Amino acid sequence: MKKIRLAVIFGGQSSEYAVSLHSAGSLIRKLHKKRYDLLLVGITKDGKWYIYDGDVESIEHDTWLQDASTCPCVLSCSTANHGFLKLCSDGSYEEIPVDCIFPVLHGKNGEDGTIQGLFELSGIPYVGCGHMSSSICMDKEMTHIVLENAKVPCAPYLCVYEEKDMDYEAVYQEAKAKLGLPIFIKPANAGSSYGISKLDSFEGFEAALKDAFYHDGKGKVILETTIEGFEIGCAVMGNRELFAGNVDEIETSLPFFDYEGKYQMVDSHIYCPARISKELIEEARTLALRAYKALNCKGMTRVDMFKTPDDQILINEVNTIPGFTDTSRYPTMMKEAGIAFSDLIDRLVDLAME
């Protein structure tokens, strides 16, 4: 059987660059080597693209760029090329066609529809959501708007736009009146819990809002009600026929599930399946599928939710390129549903190439 020429893209211009490297390392190790002819493409923090032919460890340790195998490249937007152009030192270029692209990119320019639009111009199938749903899911305000219009329950929120002479006291009082205390402050366009704060008074509010604006990069911040209870999640996969994986549960002693909790499991633990009733697990899976459809997702997403003390389930956010490390929630939830990591990769590539 002819191998699939699969381009795996890692790195990127995002605060989640390091997360991408570890996700890419795990994916490369787990995929079925006999099925794929791999092309590894790294994007530096300042946006330069390179073809890389070294070992996986150098990606995970972020020393890949120093490898002698690296060579500058670009993705051709012409459907005639259907792949990458390797830029040679003598000024010439070499065409490298690919069958499919697996973007292992998180955050800005990788998960927000930007690079997905580029893939669509090139005519190359790619894993994950399209440019529109990627963009909507990345923007927490737009996610709320679409889901609320589809009658999918979400946490109450307030959207704040950056202004030159912002009255922080007035913003705080509006948020306090609408949302109560404590409140969460989140960048509208960021992931991995960067720029998130939890406050129960005006002290530190201005600094927290400025930090969230910094990580957002687009001048928009979301303030949300603190939901009593705990976080759960559900992995979803599919295009027309959808499959919901198992549901997990986050237990943390931290104010919220932050970067260290997610990737280093500091003061946090994930249970899969979640320690809730079978009825609530099915309700969560159904709600995740409703959100997936409303947002016009395809390929895959991880739907994050809250479970309240009175057994309500509310959508928190939707991640279109979830983490892919060995301990990441998406592959773990799929494994609990009977799909091993390596088989999961195959199914996602097959969905991209439908």
Image (cartoon, helix red, strand yellow):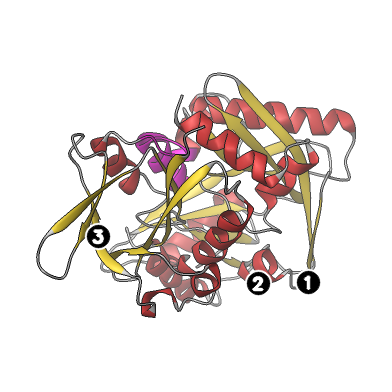
Going by the numbered disc 1, the residue's amino acid type is: Asp
Q: Residue at x 71, y 40 (%)?
A: 334
Tell me the amino acid under the disc marked 2. Answer: Glu
Labelled disc at residue 267:
1
Q: Position of residue 34 (x, y in %)?
A: 57, 44
The residue segment tinted magenta is 125-143
State the residue in front, 269 or 326: 326
User: Vertically, is 151 above or below 36?
Assistant: above
Tell me if mark 1 has few (under 14), some (14-19) or many (20+) residues whose alpha carbon lies within 10 angstroms of its own: few
Residue 106, image x, y percentages: 47, 56
Which residue corresponds to the image point at 65% horizontal and 61% vertical from the top-left?
182
Residue under circle 2? Answer: 260
The residue depicted at 39 percent of the width and 35 percent of the height is 130
Q: Nearer the viewer, residue 15 or 185?
A: 15
Q: In terms of sequence position, does the residue under pointer 1 or pointer 3 come before the other? A: 3
Residue 202 bears which disc, if any? none
Quarter of the image for residue 343 reads: top right
Q: Earlier in the sequence, mark 2 or mark 1?
A: 2
**Residue marked by disc 3:** 73
Between the C-alphas of marks 2 and 3, the distance is 34 Å
Q: CA distance from mark 1 to mark 3?
A: 42 Å
Q: Secondary structure at mark 3?
A: strand
Residue 173: x, y in percent?
50, 60
Residue 219 occupies which quadrant of the picture? bottom left
Quick one: label 2 or label 3, which is nearer the N terminus? 3
For residue 167, above or below residue 106: below
